[in-house]
């Protein structure tokens, strides 16, 4: 079974802090994604990556950056956390190919509170 | 970019009834439409998907229909059971371009009353 592991389930940070959210997958997936989930807004794409050292902006990249130094690890960075970044953050991975239809495997999420 | 709208935001049905959730998309180039189910406190999981070359797909009690002309697709759940209670998300993407990432709808909270 594919495992996508997010380093923290709950995180509390202060405004202005630099925050790192880590995600590791164990299935050699090429593609990794960061979404944030807010009630009534669904899942919104922040950043994604189709290869090591490659990154693409999603729909709401402002205030975030990412790092993918190794295939299995995709980090989301909040350079200077703000209260409007309080949210549930979901990491996902997928494999490219017609057979899989790039099915997303999600991590269990990190609930981030910025005070 | 792609925009996906999903309705209704909440849906309450009696056990055994059918439930229908509808989504519309904006980008006519989108060709892949999955549905994810998220139970309370758990991660979203794929339950069914459809490609644009197919009009309907069925898997036991769930089915998805796609109308490319109208740019909408729907999830149908028949004979609903309490374990169907969850939040359902539709999504769309174009799997043939550089950006293959899914754009999700806002979600539908389905409650099945015993």
Image: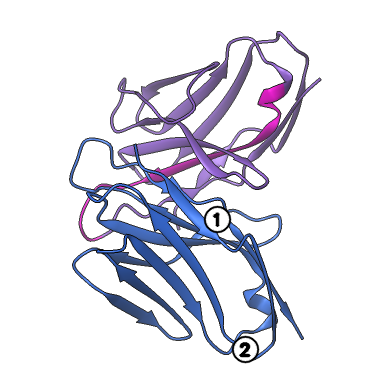
Chain colours: A purple, B blue
Q: Nearer the viewer, residue A66 or B111?
A: B111
> Which residue: 55% across, 18% down?
A77
Left or right of B85? Residue A28 is left
Observer-side mark, 1 or 2, equals: 2
Q: Does residue A98 show up magenta in the picture?
A: yes
Which quadrant, please, contains the N terminus of chain A?
bottom left
Mark on residue B17? 2
Tell me the magenta residue range.
Answer: A84-99
Q: Give the SS element for disc 2.
A: loop
Coordinates of residue B32 in the picture (x, y in percent): 29, 57
Q: Going by the image, does A58 lie left or right of B99?
A: right
**Distance in Å between CA atoms under marks 1 and 2:** 24 Å
Q: Residue at x 58, y 56 (%)?
A: B107
Q: Relative to B13, say whether A19 is above or below.
A: above
Residue at mark 2: chain: B
Q: How many marks?
A: 2
Examine the rendered structure and indicate whether residue A29 appears above or below residue B8.
above
| Residue that appears at 60% across and 44% down | A41
Residue B27 as seen in the image, left or right of residue A98: right
How far across and how far down the image is residue A111, in percent? 70, 36
């Amino acid at each position: 079974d594919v495992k996508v592991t997010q380093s923290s389930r709950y995180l509390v940070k202060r405004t202005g802090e630099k925050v790192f959210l880590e995600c590791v997958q164990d299935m050699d997936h090429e593609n990794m994604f960061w979404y944030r989930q807010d009630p009534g807004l669904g899942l919104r794409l922040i950043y994604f990556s189709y290869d090591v050292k490659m990154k693409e902006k999603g729909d709401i990249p402002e205030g975030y950056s990412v790092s993918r130094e190794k295939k299995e690890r995709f980090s989301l960075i909040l350079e200077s956390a703000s209260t409007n970044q309080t949210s549930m953050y979901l990491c996902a991975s997928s494999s490219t190919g017609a057979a899989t239809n790039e099915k997303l495997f999600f991590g269990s999420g990190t609930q981030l509170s910025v005070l | 970019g792609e925009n996906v709208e999903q309705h209704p935001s909440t849906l309450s049905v009696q056990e055994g009834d059918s439930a229908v959730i509808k989504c519309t998309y904006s980008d006519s180039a989108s060709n892949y439409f999955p549905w994810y189910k998220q139970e309370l406190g758990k991660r979203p999981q794929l339950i069914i998907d459809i490609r644009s070359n197919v009009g309907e797909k069925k898997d036991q009690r769930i089915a998805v229909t796609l109308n490319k002309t109208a740019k909408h697709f729907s999830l149908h759940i028949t004979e609903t059971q309490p374990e169907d209670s969850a939040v359902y998300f539709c999504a769309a993407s174009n799997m043939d371009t550089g950006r293959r990432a899914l754009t999700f709808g806002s979600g539908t909270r389905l409650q099945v009353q015993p």
